[in-house]
Amino acid sequence: MHFECTDLTFTYPGADKPVLDRLSFSMAAPGFNAVFGPSGVGKTSFARLLAGHGTLAEEHCRHEGLSTLLYSYNQERLPGWASTGSHLEKVCPEENTGLKDELIRIFRVESLMDARFSQLSMGQQNRMNLIRYLIQDFDLLILDESLANVDEALRETIILAMKDLFPDRLFLYISHNLMEVARFCRDILILSRGKSGTVVRGLDYTLGYVPDPAGLDRTMLEIMNAV
């Protein structure tokens, strides 16, 4: 599996300048990768283009071996007329029931199965939404701030679990958390107004990792120098 873009340019209607300007990069799949950069540089625009929310010419982006792409984003809504548990049951393929139950435990939402989505906190809503996508079949899952409002320790637990449970999938994790992407992501695509398409290699920590403080400092510095 392979994912790459070449000279991808996108301008919003009526805008003077493109939000994505000749973006070129390449990533091998599978893996837990990231898109990182300051606000306003086109991270969400890029994610939405990949997800089909706009015109994306095939000659600019190719995702070989990645036929099913899903897009999860912060503060996405679930229907409010049913409990969160019944909604997960409805969208979960029968063969993924065991996976669903494991994710509910890992994400610490067991006590929320009878609640309506509107009754949940923002962090709880984001966790429930992410479970909804992970129990579906996918080759590439874009996580656009999908763990916002979740505390740091639980985010780490969730990220490490996803890497362990889905080693054959590709993830694109969009986050403003420099340390987090440096620690847990393999390829980190840096977007900035001046430099588009730089890819930095992260530490790619997995379950049971041994911290590497010096390596973390080097990786974070390399990321910041590329922004």
Image (spheres, rainbow, N blue to C red):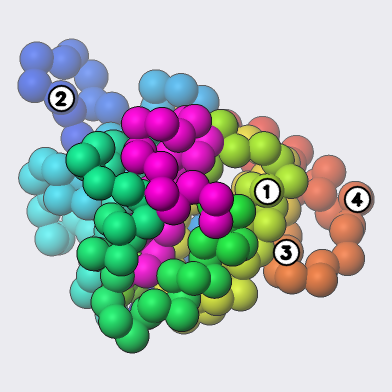
> From the viewer's perspective, is the residue at label 1 or at label 4 nearer?
1
Marks 2 and 4 in Cβ contact (< 8 Å): no
| Outermost front residue | 114
Q: Is residue 140 above or below residue 125?
A: below
Q: Could you tell me the amino acid type at mark 2?
A: Tyr
Which residue shows up at 14% across the image and 43% down it? 53
Q: Could you tell me the amino acid type at mark 3?
A: Tyr
Where does label 1 land, which residue? 154
Residue 189 lies left or right of residue 78; in this view the side is right
Q: Is residue 161 above or below residue 51?
A: below
Marks 3 and 2 in Cβ contact (< 8 Å): no
Chain-order first, disc 3 or disc 2: 2
Residue 180 lies left or right of residue 139; in this view the side is right
The crowding category of the residue bearing disc 4, from other C-alpha atoms within 10 Å (few below 14, some 14 to 19, many at least 20), is few
Q: What is the C-alpha distance between the residues marked 3 and 2?
A: 37 Å
Q: Could you tell me the amino acid type at mark 1?
A: Leu
The crowding category of the residue bearing disc 3, from other C-alpha atoms within 10 Å (few below 14, some 14 to 19, many at least 20), is many
As drawn, the label of residue 205 is: 3
Q: Which residues are magenta?
A: 110-136
- Residue 178 point in image, percent of width and height: 66, 37
Which residue shows up at 37% across the image and 69% down it? 135
State yes or no: residue 118 in magenta: yes
Where does label 2 land, which residue? 12
Chain-order first, disc 1 or disc 2: 2
Chain-order first, disc 3 or disc 1: 1
Q: Quadrant of residue 203?
A: bottom right
- Residue 142 point in image, percent of width and height: 37, 53
Q: Is residue 150 above or below residue 167?
A: above
Q: Is residue 84 visible?
A: yes
Query: In the structure shown, which secondary structural element does the residue marked by tag 4 occupy?
Result: helix
